Image: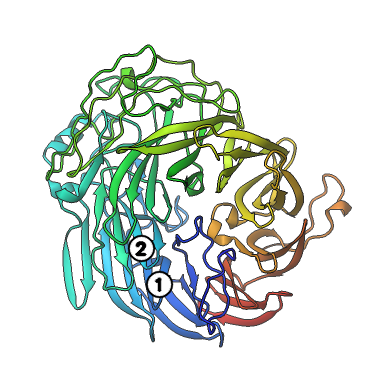
Amino acid sequence: MSADRAAPAAPTTPEHSTTNTQEVGVDEPDLVKSDGRRVLTVANGRLTVVDTDTHKVTGSLAVPGARATELLLSGDRALLILDGGPSLPKGKGGSGKMAPIPGDPGLPGTNMQARFVLVDLTAAPRTLGDLTVDGAYADARQVGSTARIVVRSRPRLNMSTYRTRDRDKAVDRIRRSTVGDWLPQFTLVANGRTESGNLVGCDRVSRPASRAGEPGHTGAATLSVLSFDLTRDLDKGDPVTVAADVDNVYASESNLYLATTTSRRAVSKDAKVIGGGPPSTTTAINQLDISGKGTPKLVATGVVSGTMVNQYAMSELGGNLRVATTLRPGDPSIPQSGPGDVPPGDTARSTTAPGTAKPGTFAPSTAQGGAAPADSVPGSAPNGSSGSAIAPSDGTDTRPTSPSMPSARPSTAPPPPIAPRSSSESAITVLARNGDRLTQIGRVGGLGRTERIMGVRFAGPIAYVVTFRQTDPLYTIDLSDPRNPRTVGELKINGYSAYLHPIADGRLIGVGQDATDSGARLGTQVSLFDVRTPADPTRVAQYTIPNGSSQAEQDAHAFLYWPKDGTVVVPVTGAYSTPDRSQIAPGEKYPGTRGTYALVLRVDGTRIVEVGRVTHPDSRILRSLVVSDELWTVSAAGVSVDRLADVRQVAWIPIG
């Protein structure tokens, strides 16, 4: 949880940390929430409420038939987010996560369900409403009391993909399908009544207008955005649906960005011959306006080349969206020019998006989800051979089409093929809204050749990018001029930081892995960087747990920073005892005892010192938070309350 945003509260409410989120003012769902007076956690299929003053459990609520995974909190209301679909059996390729459709692990199964339960907390927790939606829960964001929930769904059609020999049968199934086969269903139980049916009508379905097989747009999945005012009764969420998929979710206070990455090879027009060479990977981004408490509106769509590492690869500033991606050999270049611009030496041609929905109708198209014809796949290009570069335009038209938007206008042809890059590299692309398109206005490439992005963080006009293969270049990128971003600094050290956390006085905390000169990973590493001078970033301190790993590398919610005293807490699986590494001969096995615990560090100027470690009985610590002068750590077994100053236990609260 984050201490950067110690919540302002009434005098009777203790000072406390909140969920470690990407943007100030935009909350994210997590398995632990606190308002200072109480700590709420979902574990073992149960919501548990603990009083922070008495250290006693004051209430709990079991939710049968599903597994509670996250929650959002607003006043005396909590919204529980549950997995309500089938699970893969543990030990057989899964760990309880809901199963995808057979043959296509990227899509949710037709029998999967997302479930949302609104709970009143004024006394003993009680259910106010229960909503089930076909599909898989993707992510959520909350601004004020308004929560935006994203659900991925797929048609209830057991059709094969275009790569199989059953393509003709799949096309026939699509032609015989009805609207009910394509739209997600819902069931709402609230106020003593049960309501069910299609989640949305055709007038609430939009689809990005695109040519056949254009990157990132698919008819094999839909995404729905549900909006809930947590101060009101639960309803079906005033939903809107887009015929697209989603992998990563990012939000500012005004906009919701839904990104999906597609990797494909060129195929012949009859979809029977798959081209050779490396696949082409692109990321499509749909922008929805979520300003105010009203219905979200799809306002723009754009495409960037490459793959994002996670949600932190996106950031909005001044109305522009900055996107960090890693490009592999075969990935295309994406246009810098705006709508209607024609690349030099090219001529415009009119293209109408196939299967474009007319107002008031829903038009599934066999073109969606298929691969682009061989003659329409943009050529690959070396994006950013120097520190700053602009890619040529391919005229791609990715504008969204909905009942309130006109059909697609003419688009331009792609540029002539350009020699493909020979190795991976990374780039930051700046997108600006131009009508109903997100178009590239600036770009800096050439980052970490032969490497991939491991961590990225935007802090105002500066971006910090960590790439890794053998060493860890930390790049500082100046984005103050969005049309001319440039790399201004680079630091090469062993290992990498997967999570980056800016703190006061021009410093940056990194959580990742130490490594040898050849890139072999050595264990969890917490680094402190001085980035006051962007052109000269330096590492001033580091703390390493040999052979360790930390969930904070993959999940930012597992990281805690409390700025009041510089406390840093990360969960660690690794050696519990830590003898002086200088006393261990080269090649000698590290003698520490392996275990799971919360590592408590303190940033003191340019030093990182260990304060202590917290362990739970036979359970992995998942989260940590600060309430007043106490450190709370949470696992499936219970909650440990320790003094923040010296990590001495005050109370143990079992919840298992």
Location of residue 357 in the rendering, given as x and y in whole percent from the top left corner: 16, 38
Nearer-the-camera pick, 438 or 167: 438
Disc 2 + disc 1, Cβ < 8 Å: yes
Residue 74 numbered tag: 1
In the rendered view of the protein, which quadrant contains the N terminus? bottom right
- Give the structural element (helix, strand or loop) at label 2: strand
- Residue 468 in sight: yes
Q: Which residue appears at 17% of the width and 71% of the height?
A: 194
**Disc on res. 625:** none
| Amino acid type of the residue that numbered disc 2 sits on in the rendered structure | Ala
Residue at mark 2? 147
Quadrant position of residue 171: top left
Residue 543 picture location, percent across and down: 75, 55
Q: Considering only vertical position in the picture, is 340 above or below 311?
A: above
Name the residue: 56% across, 71% down: 634
Relative vertical location of residue 167 with respect to residue 226 in this rendering, above or below: above
For label 1, the crowd category at 10 Å Cα-Cα, with few meaning under 14, some 14 to 19 and many 20 or more, is: some
Disc 1 element: strand
Give how far across and how far down residue 233 sits, in percent: 26, 73
